[in-house]
Image (cartoon, grey):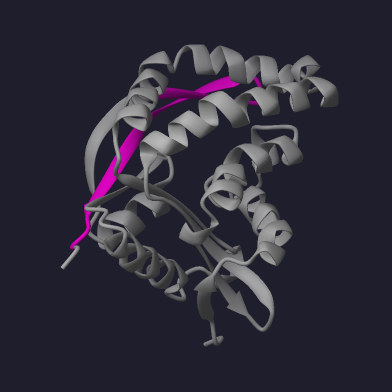
Amino acid sequence: MNKIDIRPYLKEDSSALRTLCCDVADRGGPIENFFPDREVAADLLTAYYLDYEPESTFVAECEGRLVGYINGCMDNRRYGLVMFWLLVPALLIKGLKRGIFFRPEIHQMVRGALKNWRRIFSWRKKSFHSHQGHLHIGIAADFRKQQVGRKLLDTLAAHAAGCGITELAASVHDGNKAAGIFFEARGFVVRERYPMVLVRDGKEEHYHSLLYVKAISTH
Protein backbone atom coordinates (compact mmCIF):
# COMPACT_ATOMS: atom_id res chain seq x y z
CA MET A 1 0.00 0.00 0.00
CA ASN A 2 1.20 3.50 -0.81
CA LYS A 3 2.49 5.65 2.05
CA ILE A 4 0.02 8.48 2.45
CA ASP A 5 0.64 11.52 4.62
CA ILE A 6 -2.22 13.59 6.05
CA ARG A 7 -1.24 17.19 6.72
CA PRO A 8 -2.68 20.71 6.94
CA TYR A 9 -3.41 22.52 3.69
CA LEU A 10 -0.73 24.89 2.41
CA LYS A 11 -1.29 27.78 0.02
CA GLU A 12 0.83 26.07 -2.63
CA ASP A 13 -1.69 23.17 -2.65
CA SER A 14 -4.39 25.42 -4.11
CA SER A 15 -4.05 24.52 -7.79
CA ALA A 16 -3.84 20.76 -7.19
CA LEU A 17 -6.76 20.81 -4.74
CA ARG A 18 -8.97 22.83 -7.09
CA THR A 19 -8.15 20.43 -9.93
CA LEU A 20 -8.89 17.34 -7.84
CA CYS A 21 -12.13 18.87 -6.56
CA CYS A 22 -13.38 19.31 -10.13
CA ASP A 23 -12.08 15.90 -11.20
CA VAL A 24 -14.28 14.12 -8.64
CA ALA A 25 -17.25 16.50 -8.28
CA ASP A 26 -19.82 14.31 -10.05
CA ARG A 27 -20.03 11.15 -7.92
CA GLY A 28 -16.31 10.69 -8.40
CA GLY A 29 -16.33 11.91 -12.01
CA PRO A 30 -15.49 15.29 -13.56
CA ILE A 31 -17.49 18.46 -13.02
CA GLU A 32 -17.95 18.83 -16.78
CA ASN A 33 -20.57 16.07 -16.63
CA PHE A 34 -23.05 18.74 -15.57
CA PHE A 35 -21.28 22.13 -15.39
CA PRO A 36 -19.39 23.59 -18.38
CA ASP A 37 -16.87 25.94 -16.74
CA ARG A 38 -14.24 24.32 -14.51
CA GLU A 39 -12.74 27.62 -13.34
CA VAL A 40 -16.04 29.00 -12.04
CA ALA A 41 -16.93 25.63 -10.52
CA ALA A 42 -13.62 25.47 -8.67
CA ASP A 43 -14.21 28.94 -7.24
CA LEU A 44 -17.71 28.01 -6.11
CA LEU A 45 -16.64 24.73 -4.52
CA THR A 46 -13.37 25.76 -2.87
CA ALA A 47 -13.01 29.55 -2.52
CA TYR A 48 -14.57 29.85 0.92
CA TYR A 49 -12.48 27.05 2.42
CA LEU A 50 -9.16 28.01 0.87
CA ASP A 51 -9.46 31.79 1.16
CA TYR A 52 -11.48 32.32 4.34
CA GLU A 53 -10.86 29.25 6.50
CA PRO A 54 -7.74 27.44 5.22
CA GLU A 55 -6.87 26.18 8.72
CA SER A 56 -9.83 23.78 8.49
CA THR A 57 -8.65 22.09 5.29
CA PHE A 58 -6.41 19.02 5.29
CA VAL A 59 -4.85 17.12 2.41
CA ALA A 60 -3.59 13.61 1.70
CA GLU A 61 -0.25 13.46 -0.09
CA CYS A 62 1.57 10.52 -1.65
CA GLU A 63 5.08 10.96 -3.07
CA GLY A 64 4.48 14.67 -3.61
CA ARG A 65 1.08 14.22 -5.24
CA LEU A 66 -2.11 15.56 -3.65
CA VAL A 67 -4.47 12.55 -3.70
CA GLY A 68 -7.23 13.67 -1.35
CA TYR A 69 -8.58 16.62 0.58
CA ILE A 70 -11.18 17.51 3.14
CA ASN A 71 -12.51 21.06 3.28
CA GLY A 72 -13.98 21.96 6.64
CA CYS A 73 -16.07 24.84 7.94
CA MET A 74 -16.38 25.39 11.68
CA ASP A 75 -19.18 27.98 11.47
CA ASN A 76 -22.02 27.49 8.98
CA ARG A 77 -23.34 30.98 9.68
CA ARG A 78 -20.07 32.60 8.66
CA TYR A 79 -19.94 30.38 5.56
CA GLY A 80 -23.43 31.45 4.54
CA LEU A 81 -22.69 35.13 4.99
CA VAL A 82 -19.42 34.99 3.04
CA MET A 83 -21.01 33.00 0.22
CA PHE A 84 -24.10 35.20 -0.04
CA TRP A 85 -22.47 38.62 0.24
CA LEU A 86 -18.98 38.10 -1.20
CA LEU A 87 -18.40 34.96 -3.22
CA VAL A 88 -21.64 34.47 -5.14
CA PRO A 89 -21.78 38.11 -6.40
CA ALA A 90 -18.14 37.86 -7.51
CA LEU A 91 -18.85 34.54 -9.26
CA LEU A 92 -21.85 36.00 -11.08
CA ILE A 93 -19.64 38.78 -12.45
CA LYS A 94 -16.92 36.30 -13.38
CA GLY A 95 -19.47 34.04 -15.06
CA LEU A 96 -20.83 36.92 -17.10
CA LYS A 97 -17.34 37.86 -18.25
CA ARG A 98 -16.65 34.26 -19.25
CA GLY A 99 -19.98 34.01 -21.06
CA ILE A 100 -21.19 30.92 -19.24
CA PHE A 101 -24.75 32.24 -18.88
CA PHE A 102 -25.17 31.90 -22.65
CA ARG A 103 -24.40 28.18 -22.48
CA PRO A 104 -27.38 25.81 -22.81
CA GLU A 105 -26.03 23.68 -19.95
CA ILE A 106 -26.44 26.66 -17.59
CA HIS A 107 -30.01 27.23 -18.71
CA GLN A 108 -30.73 23.58 -17.93
CA MET A 109 -29.10 23.93 -14.50
CA VAL A 110 -31.18 27.01 -13.69
CA ARG A 111 -34.38 25.17 -14.58
CA GLY A 112 -33.34 22.36 -12.28
CA ALA A 113 -32.34 24.76 -9.50
CA LEU A 114 -35.76 26.44 -9.58
CA LYS A 115 -37.27 23.06 -8.78
CA ASN A 116 -34.91 22.72 -5.82
CA TRP A 117 -36.21 25.81 -4.02
CA ARG A 118 -37.16 23.88 -0.88
CA ARG A 119 -33.68 22.40 -0.50
CA ILE A 120 -31.97 25.73 -1.27
CA PHE A 121 -34.15 27.60 1.24
CA SER A 122 -33.41 25.04 3.94
CA TRP A 123 -29.65 25.22 3.22
CA ARG A 124 -29.74 29.02 3.40
CA LYS A 125 -31.62 29.00 6.69
CA LYS A 126 -29.20 26.53 8.28
CA SER A 127 -26.16 28.35 6.90
CA PHE A 128 -27.24 31.65 8.38
CA HIS A 129 -28.44 30.37 11.75
CA SER A 130 -26.21 27.44 12.70
CA HIS A 131 -22.79 27.76 14.30
CA GLN A 132 -22.00 24.10 13.74
CA GLY A 133 -19.69 22.81 11.01
CA HIS A 134 -19.74 20.97 7.72
CA LEU A 135 -17.29 19.32 5.34
CA HIS A 136 -16.58 18.48 1.73
CA ILE A 137 -14.26 15.61 0.82
CA GLY A 138 -12.67 14.32 -2.38
CA ILE A 139 -10.34 11.40 -3.13
CA ALA A 140 -8.46 10.67 -6.37
CA ALA A 141 -9.93 7.66 -8.20
CA ASP A 142 -6.78 5.54 -7.90
CA PHE A 143 -6.51 6.14 -4.13
CA ARG A 144 -9.97 5.11 -3.07
CA LYS A 145 -10.42 2.12 -0.74
CA GLN A 146 -7.06 2.86 0.87
CA GLN A 147 -8.47 4.48 4.04
CA VAL A 148 -7.61 7.97 2.77
CA GLY A 149 -11.12 9.29 3.42
CA ARG A 150 -11.21 7.81 6.91
CA LYS A 151 -7.89 9.39 7.85
CA LEU A 152 -8.91 12.77 6.48
CA LEU A 153 -12.23 12.66 8.28
CA ASP A 154 -10.64 11.64 11.58
CA THR A 155 -8.18 14.52 11.24
CA LEU A 156 -10.94 17.04 10.61
CA ALA A 157 -13.04 15.64 13.47
CA ALA A 158 -10.12 16.15 15.87
CA HIS A 159 -9.71 19.71 14.58
CA ALA A 160 -13.46 20.35 15.01
CA ALA A 161 -13.37 19.02 18.57
CA GLY A 162 -10.52 21.41 19.34
CA CYS A 163 -12.68 24.25 18.03
CA GLY A 164 -15.57 23.24 20.29
CA ILE A 165 -17.73 22.00 17.41
CA THR A 166 -20.21 19.31 18.45
CA GLU A 167 -21.56 18.36 15.01
CA LEU A 168 -20.24 18.03 11.48
CA ALA A 169 -22.55 17.74 8.49
CA ALA A 170 -22.10 16.60 4.90
CA SER A 171 -24.61 16.90 2.07
CA VAL A 172 -24.83 14.28 -0.71
CA HIS A 173 -27.60 13.02 -2.95
CA ASP A 174 -28.86 9.46 -2.77
CA GLY A 175 -27.61 8.70 -6.27
CA ASN A 176 -24.10 8.80 -4.82
CA LYS A 177 -24.23 5.39 -3.17
CA ALA A 178 -20.51 5.23 -2.41
CA ALA A 179 -20.62 8.50 -0.46
CA GLY A 180 -23.61 7.32 1.56
CA ILE A 181 -21.86 4.07 2.48
CA PHE A 182 -18.71 5.98 3.47
CA PHE A 183 -20.48 8.44 5.76
CA GLU A 184 -22.66 5.82 7.41
CA ALA A 185 -19.60 3.67 8.10
CA ARG A 186 -18.02 6.65 9.87
CA GLY A 187 -20.99 7.22 12.17
CA PHE A 188 -22.96 9.81 10.21
CA VAL A 189 -26.75 9.54 10.21
CA VAL A 190 -29.28 11.08 7.84
CA ARG A 191 -31.01 13.92 9.64
CA GLU A 192 -32.93 15.47 6.75
CA ARG A 193 -33.77 14.75 3.12
CA TYR A 194 -35.15 16.97 0.39
CA PRO A 195 -36.24 16.23 -3.20
CA MET A 196 -33.78 17.58 -5.74
CA VAL A 197 -33.38 17.73 -9.51
CA LEU A 198 -30.19 17.53 -11.55
CA VAL A 199 -30.20 18.20 -15.29
CA ARG A 200 -27.74 16.22 -17.37
CA ASP A 201 -27.69 16.27 -21.18
CA GLY A 202 -31.02 18.06 -21.13
CA LYS A 203 -32.73 15.35 -19.06
CA GLU A 204 -33.93 15.69 -15.51
CA GLU A 205 -32.62 13.28 -12.90
CA HIS A 206 -34.56 13.10 -9.65
CA TYR A 207 -32.86 12.37 -6.34
CA HIS A 208 -33.06 13.23 -2.67
CA SER A 209 -30.49 15.49 -1.07
CA LEU A 210 -29.37 13.84 2.19
CA LEU A 211 -27.98 15.80 5.12
CA TYR A 212 -25.62 13.49 6.99
CA VAL A 213 -24.68 14.58 10.53
CA LYS A 214 -22.11 13.20 12.96
CA ALA A 215 -21.80 14.10 16.64
CA ILE A 216 -18.29 15.19 17.63
CA SER A 217 -16.98 14.58 21.14
CA THR A 218 -15.22 17.64 22.56
CA HIS A 219 -13.82 15.77 25.59
In the image, 100: left or right of 159?
right
Q: Position of residue 22 (x, y in %)?
A: 65, 48
Q: How many marks?
A: 0
| Vertical placement of residue 90 versus 210, above or below | above
Is 160 contained in the magenta span? no
Q: Nearer the viewer, residue 24 or 68?
A: 68
Q: Nearer the viewer, residue 92 or 176?
A: 92
In the image, 48: left or right of 127?
right
Look at the magenta stretch and give its main secondary structure: strand
**Which region of the structure is painted magenta?**
196-217
Q: Position of residue 159 (x, y in %)?
A: 36, 65
| Vertical placement of residue 85 versus 187, above or below | above
Q: Position of residue 211 (x, y in %)?
A: 31, 38
| Vertical placement of residue 53 versus 125, above or below | below
Quadrant of the image occupied by residue 174? top left
Quadrant of the image occupied by residue 173? top left
Residue sitting at x 47%, y 29%: 81
| Vertical placement of residue 213 versus 211, above or below | below
Quadrant for the C terminus in the image: bottom left
Residue sitting at x 36%, y 28%: 128
Q: Position of residue 171 (x, y in %)?
A: 38, 41
Residue sitting at x 57%, y 66%: 9
Residue sitting at x 55%, y 47%: 52
Is 209 contained in the magenta span? yes
